[in-house]
Amino acid sequence: MESLARHKDLVDKEALSIDIAEARSWREHAREDVERREKERLASQLQDSITWLGVGDCLQENELDRLSRRRQPDTCDWILKTAKFKSWKKEAYGEPLMWLRGIPGAGWSSHCMDYGEETYELIIGKSVLCSHIIHSLKSEPKLTTIYYFCNSQTDGRDVCNRLMRTLALQLLRAHIDLAPHISDNYTQRGYNPSMQQLRKLLPELLATTQMTRIVIDGLDECQGHDQRTALQELISLCSPSLSCCKILFSSREGVQISKVLSRKPSISLRDERSGVDPDIRLFVHQHLADLRERFHGEIIDNIEEIVVNKADGKAW
């Protein structure tokens, strides 16, 4: 009887162990199934949200890549060390707007010099500088960085709408957990991505991110009315309730833009000669390296000096 009792206890314990193992296995499968369904649901909502925004951001990514490839190694680092930029990037409070400004070609001209069969195009511009700033910001793990490059092809209908939709899409890609909000509150309700809806959506998305930095380059390339509308809409994103959001505008000193940004903290390429001139000199020096082997070094040095001295935008 004692033996049977012990045997019964062993059988009961074995059965209990089997039940526990099966329960654990069932729970694990159930958890995996829930996670799989949730991932599928999120992926569906993400795709719905991207489709609803109706704008592709690959053009902006390609433009960022193109401009980044133009940057001469060891150039553009000076702006990251300026006190104004550091304050704009790091400080949670304070003035949320900053203006990187310059006249057309100031310090960063596109100029072709033809030496027989050799043509050298000097391209170091505000857009290249912005691409370096964007990459620097993106390397900061606590920052969410979104951006938009305007150009002559940007001009046309719904410039501001396309800009705002692109920023919303970049925020969504940076934080895909925002997809349910867009899907539930906008796509499923049949709304269009109009300015009326974007004015509501972007602040809602920005409110969920701790620190967002927005870089807008080349707004002066747009028509005057588009500049005014875009400035108004973008600046509204920096309301006191969204103190975590800051915007850097990079443009020439146009009438419309100057009227709005002239009293904001700014970095002028013309005033930053200590940073700009070494970059231009390094760029020119490296691009004239081959000519030094073909011509007398003093001649090339003189050419280099002329190019650097004329890079203030007055003669180019």
Image (cartoon, rainbow, N blue to C red):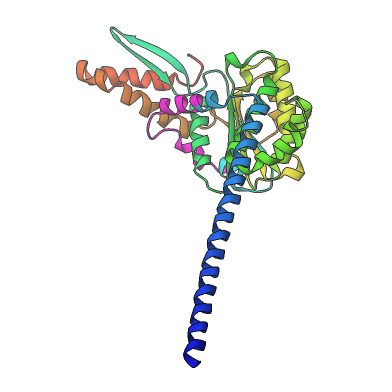
| Residue 220 showing in the rendered view | yes
On the image, the x and y values in percent for residue 298 come to 25, 20
At 72% across and 33% down in the image, what residue appears?
A: 235
Above or below, comparing residue 89 to residue 101 in the picture: below
Magenta residue check for 198: no
Q: Nearer the viewer, residue 250 or 211?
A: 211
Q: Please name the residue shown 49% across and 87% down the image.
A: 4
Up-down relation of residue 61 to residue 16 (above or below): above
- Residue 101 visible? The answer is no
Q: Main secondary structure of the magenta part?
A: helix
Q: Report the number of discs.
A: 0
**Percent x, y for residue 54?**
65, 24
Residue 25 position, x and y percent, is: 53, 61
Residue 256 occupies quadrant: top right
Q: Is residue 80 magenta?
A: yes
Most extreme residue toward the front, as rendered?
Answer: 1
The residue shown at (74%, 33%) is 188
Camera-side residue: 40 or 50?
40
Determine whether, in the image, residue 123 is placed left or right of residue 245: left
x and y percentages locating residue 168 in the rendered image: 65, 33
* Left or right relative to 229: residue 293: left
Nearer to us in this view, 179 or 88: 179
Range of residues picked out in magenta: 62-84
Instruction: State left or right for residue 259 relative to residue 277.
Output: right
**Which residue appears farthest toward the top when viewing the image?**
116
